Amino acid sequence: MSDINKLNGELRDDFGKGAARQARRAGKIPAVIYGHGAEPIHVLLPAQQTTLAVRTANALLTIVVDGEEHMALVKDVQRHALKMTVDHLDLLTVRRGEKVNVEVNIHVEGEVAAGAVFNLEHPQVSVEAEAVNLPENVVINVEGREAGENVLASDIQLPAGTTLLIDPETVIATVSIPVEVDLGEAAEGEATEAAAEEAKEEESAE
């Protein structure tokens, strides 16, 4: 479940890259709150507190601006390419009881049968859930699955109140026999080639 984090924001009236850089140097993150047909609200948020609040996907925040609270879902986090610090946030206004569509991670439980391996084809899936009760992830169980079996979207374990938004027949993970690579012949060939080169060098030296 997403935590509701309360952050104090201040209205932003200076725009452009220069103003954004200046705000970040002052320990603030530019953000925009939009949705429900209202005019977008441009704000500045405290960098340290905000960075902690958006560590998890689909974080739900309460932004207080001029005494008014705005409950918003983090829709996009723009980060610095090298430092990976948060540069900008897009926040979607939501209401209690409202359902939203989000991408959530697949969590894998269990182990496949001995000698088999599994490959996660879809690490994330789209679901619909209440904005104030979003799942952190959904679960598939691969316990005892044999090579040749597939895990379908219909096999995903969904929390109460969560609806899957993809075809139930979508292959989420495959189970197969690991591909064996015989390195013996290759290594032997390299050794033979090296020996031949060494022999040529010795002949040249003589």
Image (cartoon, helix red, strand yellow):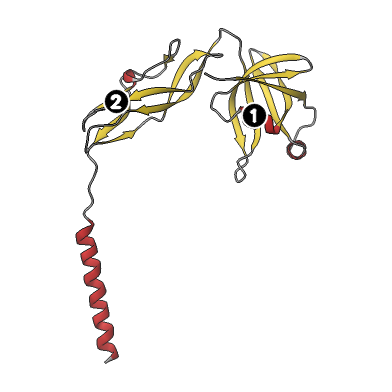
Question: Which kind of residue does numbered mark 1 sit on?
Answer: Leu
Give the residue number, with chain letter if any, for mark 2: 151
Q: Earlier in the sequence, mark 2 or mark 1?
A: 1
Residue at screen point 47% across, 15% down: 128
Q: Nearer the viewer, mark 2 or mark 1?
A: 2
Q: Observer-nearest residue: 127 or 139?
A: 139
- Residue 167, compared with residue 146, is above or below; it is above
- Residue 204, compared with residue 72, is above or below; it is below
- Determine which quarter of the picture holds residue 190: bottom left
- Residue 51, compared with residue 100, is above or below; it is below
- Determine which quarter of the picture holds residue 138: top left
Q: Observer-nearest residue: 83 or 110?
A: 110
Question: In terms of secondary structure, where does tag 1 sit?
Answer: strand
Give the residue number, with chain letter if any, for mark 1: 89
Question: Which kind of residue does numbered mark 2 sit on?
Answer: Val
CA–CA distance in space, label 2 to label 1: 35 Å
Name the spot of residue 47 as percent of width and height, x first: 70, 33
Q: Observer-nearest residue: 178 or 76?
A: 178
Name the spot of residue 200 as percent of width and height, x first: 25, 82
Residue at screen point 35% across, 24% down: 140
Residue at screen point 78% across, 15% down: 67
